[in-house]
Image (cartoon, helix red, strand yellow):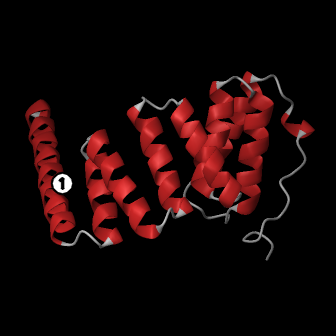
Amino acid sequence: AEIAAATTKAQEVASERTTALREARALAAETPDDVGAWLQLAMAAAAGGDSATETMALEQAERLTGGDPAIRALRAEAMARAADGQVTIPARQLIAEILAVDPVEPRALYLSGLAAYQDEDYASAVGIWRRLQSLSSPDAPWMTLLAENIDDAARSGGIDPGSFAAAPAGPDRAG
């Protein structure tokens, strides 16, 4: 009975994702100049595992905004997700471009740290992620994952966590 219930639930979720993707495609087609419609399509595609549609929708949103760094960072994240979590060379190039324009863009900083981690440059990963930690609000949704990643990178690199000074107060943490 548990297997049947789980199977039914999985089918319902898949059906809901298919419906959401179909509706988001229709909305984007009806309102091609609406950035929100393209972002909604990207989110629906991501939920359904359709990397090609997600990337295409983010590229369109990026064009409509003239290259908004946050949307570009979403695209870099989508590129990494499409590569099974690997921050590929094209994604790294995009991240570098984003950080050149907006050095505190959180998603780009996170991905930059992830790239360093994947290169086994654990000290750089810790440093980048500590910087992101210092810039983030204490209740930012990524703080738990970030702390876990920092600890993991420090352990993987044989780095004494005490060798990194406490993260300085960022603009959101200072008061």
**Residue at 72% in and 23% down:** 156
Q: Quadrant of residue 79?
A: top left
Q: Residues within 10 Å of mark 1 (few under 14, many from 20)?
A: many
Residue designated by label 1: 21
Height in image: 127 above or below 64?
above
Left or right: where does residue 20 sit relative to residue 68?
left
- The percent coordinates of residue 21 (x first, y second) are 18, 54
**Residue at 42% in and 37% down:** 81
Q: Secondary structure at mark 1?
A: helix
**Residue at 84% in and 36% down:** 161
Nearer-the-camera pick, 14 or 91: 91
Q: Quadrant of residue 117?
A: top right
Q: Quadrant of the N terminus?
A: top left
- The percent coordinates of residue 30 (x first, y second) are 15, 70
Left or right: where does residue 109 sit relative to residue 84?
right
Left or right: where does residue 53 sit relative to residue 108?
left
Height in image: 70 above or below 117?
below
- The percent coordinates of residue 58 (x first, y second) are 38, 55
Residue 57 visible within the image = yes
- The percent coordinates of residue 44 (x first, y second) are 26, 54
Residue type, numbered disc 1: Leu
